[in-house]
Image (spheres, coloured by chain):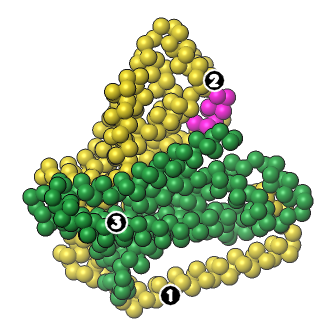
C-alpha cells in the first residue's frame, strides 16, 4: 500500500499524460471520424471509396502494429520524433477515427428518411442537408456508442505506455521494476487511476442512453 | 446507387466530381510515390533484403509467430465464451448477492486496459507469458461477452420470459432454454466482431514478451540484422491484417445472413421439417 502513496507524484503525472493523450486524440478522432462518415455518404464516388477503404483497413490493424511501426520501424528509416507523444497521438487518433466514422454512419442511417426528404424538398444542398439536418440528429443518437469508443481510446492509450511514452501504464511498468516486492500494489494503483476515467465515462454513457431511449 | 441525400449528379456535378477524384488520386499517389522513393533511397528495395523470404527459416519463424498468435486467441476465445455466459447469468440473477458483486466485477474488468491485466498476471502470479496473455484476454473478453449477451436478452420481447415462466420453468430454466439461445443468435454478429477485437488484442502479447508474430519480427531483425526489419515487418503486418479482415468479413456475412432470416422477427424461426428457401 505504501508504494502507492509514496509514488503518488508519478501516478499523477502519468494520469495527466494519459488524460492528455486521450483528450487530444479524442478531439482529433471525432473531427476526422465525422468527416470520414460524411465522405462515406457523399455523392463523390472517390470519397466514398476512400472512406470505406480507410475504415476497413484501419479497423483491422492491431494498434500494437501501428505503434511498433512508429517506434521501431520508422527510426530505422530515418524518421524520428522529437517527442514520441506526437507519434502516439497520430496513431491513436487515426485508429479511433475509423471506429467513430462507423458509429456516426450508423447514426446517419438511423435518422428517418423523411428528414432528408423534407430538407431536400425545401431546396437544401447536400452539404446543408448533412450539416444542418442529418448530422445534428445522428450525432445525438450515437452519443452512447461514441462515449464507449472514447473509453476504449483511454484504455488503448496504454499501448503508448509500452512504447516509451510515460503515461499511466508506462509509469506502472517502471514502478513495478523499482518496487519488485510490491508489484501487486503498484499495478492496483495504476488500475485505480484508469478506472477513475473509465467508470465515470461509462456511467455518463449509460445515463445518456436511458435519456435517449425515453426521448424516442 | 441513389441516395435521398442528393440528386443524381448531372453533367456539371459529374465533371466536378471526376476532376476532384483525379486530383485526389494524384495527391494520394504522389504521397505514396514519395514514400516509396524515400524507402528506395534507404535501400529498402534492394533484392537481397527481400531475398530472405527465400529462406525456409524465415517462414518457419513467421509461421511460429502466427500460430502463437492464433493459438492464444483460440484458447482465450474458447475459455472466455463459457465464462462470459456464466457471468451474464450471474449478472441478471434474481438473487441480489450474486447480481451486485458480479456487476462490480464486470465494471472493473471492462474499465481496464487489457495489457495491464496481462502485466498483472505476468508479474503478480509469476506465470509464463503465454498464460499471462491468455488470462488477460479471457478476463477482458468474458466481461464483454457477458455484456453483449445481456444486451441480447434484454432486447427479447418480454413475452418470451413470461411464456417460459408460465409453462412452469424456473427462472433459471427459462433463461437457459428460452432466452439464451435466442439472445446468442441475435447477438452473433457482435460476438464475432468481438472475436476480431480479441484476435487484434493478442498483438498486445508483444508488450509482455509473448512470442507472437510481432515478437517474431523483432527476433528476426535482431538476429538477421536491422536492414531486414522493414521487409519482415511489412510481411508480418500484411499477414496480421489479412487474418483480421477475413474474420471481419465472416462477421459481416453472418450479420447479413442473420438479418435475412430474422426479417420476420423471432417468432419466424424455422421449424423442424420446413426447409428455409429464403434467398
The numbered mark, 2 or 1, whose residue comes first in the sequence reads: 1
Measured as percent of width and height from the top left, residue B236 is found at 34, 66
Distance between the alpha carbons at the discs numbered 2 and 1: 57 Å
Quarter the N terminus of chain A occupies: bottom left
Q: Which chain is yellow?
A: B
The percent coordinates of residue A76 (x first, y second) are: 31, 84
Callout 3–callout 1 Cβ contact below 8 Å: no
- Above or below, A195 against B235 in this view is above
Q: Vertically, is B218 above or below B171? A: below
Q: To which residue does mark 1 refer?
A: B34
Residue behind mark 3: A15
- Please determine whether, in this image, residue B251 is positioned above or below residue A172: above
Q: Are marks 3 and 2 on the same chain?
A: no
Q: Residue B63 at x, y = what percent?
A: 27, 59
Q: Is residue B63 magenta?
A: no
Q: Is residue B259 magenta?
A: yes
Q: Residue furthest left?
A: A181
Q: Is residue A47 left or right of residue A206?
A: right
The chain that appears green in the image is: A
Q: Nearer the viewer, mark 3 or mark 2?
A: 3
- Name the mark on residue B268: 2
Residue at 43%, 28% in the rendered image:
B92
- Residue furthest right in the image: A122
Q: Nearer the viewer, residue A131 or B50?
A: A131
On residue A152, the disc is none
Using the rendered image, report if marks 2 and 1 lie on a common chain: yes
Q: Chain of mark 2?
A: B
* Magenta range: B258-265
Amino acid at each position: 500500500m505504501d508504494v502507492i502513496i509514496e509514488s503518488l507524484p508519478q501516478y499523477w503525472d502519468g494520469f495527466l499524460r494519459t488524460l492528455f493523450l486521450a483528450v487530444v486524440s479524442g478531439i482529433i478522432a471525432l473531427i476526422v471520424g465525422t468527416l470520414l462518415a460524411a465522405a462515406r455518404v457523399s455523392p463523390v464516388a472517390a470519397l466514398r471509396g476512400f472512406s470505406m477503404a480507410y475504415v476497413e483497413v484501419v479497423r483491422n490493424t492491431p494498434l500494437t502494429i501501428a505503434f511498433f511501426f512508429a517506434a521501431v520501424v520508422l527510426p530505422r528509416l530515418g524518421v524520428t520524433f522529437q517527442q514520441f507523444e506526437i507519434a502516439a497521438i497520430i496513431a491513436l487518433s487515426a485508429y479511433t477515427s475509423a471506429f467513430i466514422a462507423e458509429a456516426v454512419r450508423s447514426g446517419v442511417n438511423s435518422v428517418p428518411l423523411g428528414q432528408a426528404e423534407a430538407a431536400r424538398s425545401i431546396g437544401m444542398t447536400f452539404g446543408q442537408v448533412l450539416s444542418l439536418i442529418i448530422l445534428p440528429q445522428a450525432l445525438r443518437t450515437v452519443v452512447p456508442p461514441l462515449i464507449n469508443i472514447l473509453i476504449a481510446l483511454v484504455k488503448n492509450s496504454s499501448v503508448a505506455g509500452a512504447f516509451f511514452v510515460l503515461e499511466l501504464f508506462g509509469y506502472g511498468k517502471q514502478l513495478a521494476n523499482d518496487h519488485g516486492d510490491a508489484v501487486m500494489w503498484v499495478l492496483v494503483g495504476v488500475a485505480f487511476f484508469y478506472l477513475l476515467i473509465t467508470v465515470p465515462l461509462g456511467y455518463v454513457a449509460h445515463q445518456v442512453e436511458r435519456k435517449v431511449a425515453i426521448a424516442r | 446507387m441513389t441516395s435521398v441525400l442528393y440528386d443524381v449528379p448531372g453533367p456539371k456535378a459529374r465533371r466536378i466530381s471526376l476532376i476532384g477524384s483525379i486530383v485526389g488520386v494524384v495527391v494520394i499517389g504522389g504521397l505514396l510515390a514519395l514514400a516509396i522513393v524515400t524507402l528506395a533511397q534507404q535501400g529498402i528495395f534492394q533484392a537481397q533484403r527481400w531475398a530472405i523470404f527465400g529462406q525456409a527459416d524465415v517462414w518457419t519463424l513467421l509461421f511460429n509467430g502466427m500460430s502463437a498468435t492464433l493459438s492464444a486467441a483460440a484458447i482465450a476465445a474458447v475459455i472466455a465464451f463459457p465464462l462470459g455466459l456464466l457471468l451474464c447469468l450471474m449478472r441478471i440473477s434474481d438473487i441480489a448477492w450474486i447480481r451486485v458483486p458480479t456487476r462490480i466485477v464486470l465494471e472493473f474488468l471492462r474499465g481496464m486496459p487489457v495489457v495491464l491485466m496481462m502485466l498483472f498476471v505476468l508479474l503478480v502470479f509469476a506465470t509464463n507469458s503465454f498464460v499471462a496473455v491468455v488470462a488477460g484476454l479471457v478476463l477482458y473478453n468474458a466481461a464483454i461477452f457477458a455484456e453483449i449477451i445481456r444486451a441480447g436478452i434484454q432486447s427479447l420481447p418480454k413475452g418470451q420470459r413470461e411464456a417460459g415462466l408460465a409453462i412452469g420453468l424456473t427462472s433459471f430454466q427459462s433463461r437457459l432454454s428460452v432466452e439464451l439461445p435466442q439472445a446468442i443468435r441475435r447477438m452473433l454478429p457482435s460476438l464475432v466482431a468481438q472475436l476480431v477485437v480479441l484476435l487484434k488484442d493478442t498483438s498486445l502479447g508483444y508488450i509482455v514478451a509473448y512470442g507472437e508474430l510481432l515478437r517474431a519480427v523483432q527476433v528476426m531483425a535482431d538476429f538477421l540484422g536491422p536492414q531486414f526489419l522493414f521487409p519482415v515487418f511489412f510481411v508480418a503486418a500484411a499477414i496480421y491484417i489479412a487474418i483480421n479482415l477475413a474474420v471481419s468479413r465472416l462477421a459481416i456475412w453472418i450479420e447479413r445472413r442473420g438479418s435475412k432470416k430474422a426479417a420476420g422477427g423471432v417468432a419466424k424461426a424455422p421449424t423442424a421439417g420446413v426447409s428455409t428457401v429464403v434467398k
